[in-house]
Image (tube, rainbow, N blue to C red):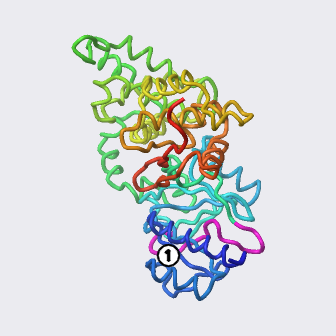
Amino acid sequence: MSTATATATVRRDAALDYRERGFPITLCDGKEPISKGWQNKTWTPKEIIQAFRHRPQLNVGSVWGPRAGLIDMECDNKQAEASLLELFEGNCPVTATFRSARGPHRLFAWDAALEQIGKAKMDYNGLEIFIGANGLGAQTLLPPSTTDGFTRTWLVPLEDCDPAPLPESVVRRLLSSSRATLLETARPKMAAIAAAGALTGGTDTEDTVDTGGFRRLLGNTNLPVSSESSVSYPDIEALVRRSLPSAAGQRHRKIFELARELKAVPSLAAAPAVSHRAIVQRWHELALPAISTKPFEDSWFDFLDAWDRVRKAKGESLIDEIVGRAIAAGVPEEAKHYSRPELRLLVAICRQLQRESKSGTFFLSCYTAAELIGVDDHRTAWRWLGGLCKEGILELVTKGMIKNHRASEYRYLGPLEG
């Protein structure tokens, strides 16, 4: 097989994979879609295979907006990167990201309020955002498409990270930048409520925190955790304080930790997220000296998002116990030639996960792997997992998928004894 044929096969397989993941793909000659009506075109697997058979130079892209459930933010210069940080107030979440010749593209979940922008794409102080609002077409090429001698590559792969949702504050800024506002167009009912005095109560409450409500909710009431124990206001006060940021730039991560802390308390975990407003208000009050985002609503909406994204409650020890048993079992023979102790530990953990799996396979994301073995960059763990597959120590059974929010599934192929 020639190099050109092999490259075309890689792009064809990528197109099929993106389609399977739910992307409304485009097939492009260079950067231009080859089909008329590409904004609404749905490619079948048969059509994809035939297209690459006849035109092996094709690239693969995606339509953005409601069809994909995603938008694309492209940073092609320092000004764009600065605008991205300003848009997210210095707390841009980790999200699926790929690199083009011009710079990184970050994918974020679509928000229905963006329809008000009414454009295919917009410019936010130099940051180009492909939105696809109001039925208007917006598309960009995806890896491994090649233009001008540059092949696009994933920096944060789809199988390792879901595209992050846009915080409410970011949506507001985008709408404001495009001469629309949430109060006037996205939420007209709020104006009527505010006019009646129900929203403000006749006072300026933008930065007010109802700590009294928190104390009334928890101060004199024990919330049952189990038949043997209970949690009261002092318990939750300590829980809140464990999750506080110490400096600007930590707000998103610490709110996520707060959600994990609350989910570790069974009675709180069983309650809906909206019932924890007073707790989040208390957290926000204590965090105000350290955070740059002052309005409570931003922290509240971020907490509601974090609550849905938490997969492991704080203190869940199953994986820690597995790591402990992996360390106690020693380094597998097939890993002893590796010089990095972290890599040897990764192989030992994979072996232990396989030993304890009832299904014959195990799930592991590069983020979890990086945390367990103590490497700072999840991409290092991602490369190592891929290398272990190539060396025949692991088998990749299924890639992680955006739709089902699952990590990649592996099978350990080395001996389980010893």
Give me the residue at 38% from left, 13% from top.
235
What amino acid does circle 1 point to? Leu
Residue drawn at (72%, 60%), measured in percent from left and top? 103
| Residue 168 in view | no
Left or right: 173 with respect to 402? right
The residue that appears at 50% across and 81% down in the rendered structure is 38
Q: How many marks?
A: 1
Residue 192 in the image: state x and y as whole percent: 31, 51
Residue at 33 percent across and 46 percent down: it is 195
Nearer to us in this view, 340 or 72: 340
Residue stretch in magenta: 132-151
Using the rendered view, name the quadrant where residue 200 is placed: top left
**In-image side of 159 versus 199 (left or right):** right
Residue 365 against residue 418 in the figure, above or below: below
What is the x, y in percent for residue 296?
46, 34
Q: Residues within 10 Å of mark 1 (few under 14, many from 20)?
A: some
The x, y position of residue 316, in whole percent, is 42, 25
Find disc 1 in the rendering and name its residue.
136
Q: Quadrant of the N terminus?
A: bottom right
Q: Is residue 141 magenta?
A: yes
Q: Position of residue 399 (x, y in %)?
A: 49, 54
Identify the image quadrant of the C terminus: top right
Please tell me whether residue 52 belongs to the stretch shown in magenta. Answer: no
Query: Which residue occupies the foreground of this view, 278 or 132?
Result: 132
